[in-house]
Amino acid sequence: MRNTLWILALVLVAGAAAPSNAMQGKPPAKGAAAKYDAAKLKTMEAKLAKNPKDAKLALEVAEANYQVGHTMMYDETLPPRQKYRPALKHFRRAMELNPKHAKAAADRKQIEDIYKQMGMPIPQ
C-alpha cells in the first residue's frame, strides 16, 4: 500500500494521468454507463435541498456523489489536479449524507493519505 500511495503522489505532483493499476479500487468499466452523472446529481441535490428530511433521497444522493467522485477519480482524461480535489468533495458529501458509506470512506482516505504522504495540506 505504501508503494501505491507513493506512486499516486508522484502522479499527482507530476500532473500526469494516474495509471489505473496503481489505484486500489477499480475504475469504472470502459463503455459502462454509470447510473449517476454530474447533471443528474445536480438535479438530485436540488430535490434534496427542497426536502432535506427525505431519508431515502439522502441515501440516493450520497450514492450519486460517490459514483460521480469515483468516476472522476479514475478519469484518465483529467489531470490529477483537476480530479482528486473535486472527487474528494464528492466523497465527503457522500459521507455527510451517509456516514456508513464504506466505499466513499475508503476513496476519501486514499486521496487524503496521498496528500499526507506528500506533506501537502489536505484540501478542504
Image (cartoon, rainbow, N blue to C red):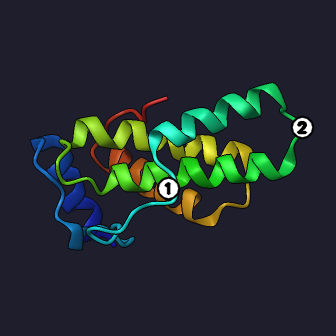
Mark 2 vs 1, N-terminal side: 2
Q: Residues within 10 Å of mark 2 (few under 14, many from 20)?
A: few
Q: Position of residue 46 (x, y in %)?
A: 67, 28
Q: Residue at x 46, y 40 (%)?
A: 38
- Identify which residue is drawn at 51% across, 59% down: 35
Q: Tell me the quarter of the image containing the N terminus.
A: bottom left
- Image coords of residue 56 (percent x, y): 82, 53
Instruction: Tell me if mark 1 has few (under 14), some (14-19) or many (20+) residues whose alpha carbon lies within 10 angstroms of its own.
Output: many
Which residue is labeled 2 in the image?
53
Q: Is residue 4 visible in this depiction of the protein? A: yes
Tag 2 secondary structure: loop
Q: Mark 1 = which residue?
A: 67
The quarter of the displayed image where residue 43 is located: top right
**Residue in the image at 40% along x and 51% along y:** 111
The outermost residue toward the right is 53
Closer-to-camera residue (32/74): 32
Amino acid type of disc 1? Gln
**Above or below: residue 105 compared with residue 81:** below
Answer above or below: position of 40 versus 20: above
Residue type at tag 2? Lys
